[in-house]
Image: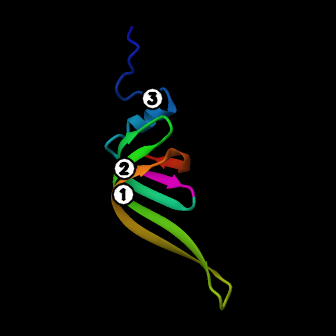
Amino acid sequence: MSDKKEEGTVEEPLDLIRLSLDERIFVKMRQDRELKGKLHAYDQHLNMILSDVEETIKVVEKDEETDEEIVKSIKRNIKMLFIRGDGVILINF
């Protein structure tokens, strides 16, 4: 019997990430930041390298006249991005 994991099997949570290498994933970060990009690498701390990333940041501003909160989304594209794992809240495959 082999100790090697079969390709495509999931035994641990990080196996789900392994199966998503070279696929587009969605990452929700702290401070209302969301990322969509192609996963190239990761480690046990959830540090990741993504390419062709679309970043969305939600910013809440207060209208001085009406005191209403206005939510704005700021988007930008990033060719290659290193994500530090301690900021990751959620990963969607």
56 vs 64, left or right, is left
**Extreme-bottom residue of the structure:** 65
Magenta stretch bounds: 25-30
Q: Which mark is residue 53?
A: 1
User: Depth check: 85 or 2 in front?
Assistant: 85
Amino acid tagged 1 = Val
Q: Earlier in the sequence, mark 2 or mark 3?
A: 3
Q: Earlier in the sequence, mark 3 or mark 1?
A: 3
User: Depth check: 7 or 46 in front?
Assistant: 46
**Extreme-right residue of the structure:** 67
Amino acid tagged 2 = Leu
Q: Quadrant of residue 36?
A: bottom left
Percent x, y for residue 77? Answer: 35, 64
Q: Secondary structure at mark 3?
A: loop
Image quarter of the N terminus: top left
Percent x, y for residue 39? Answer: 36, 46
Instruction: Find the distance from the CA under tag 2 to the CA under tag 3.
Output: 22 Å
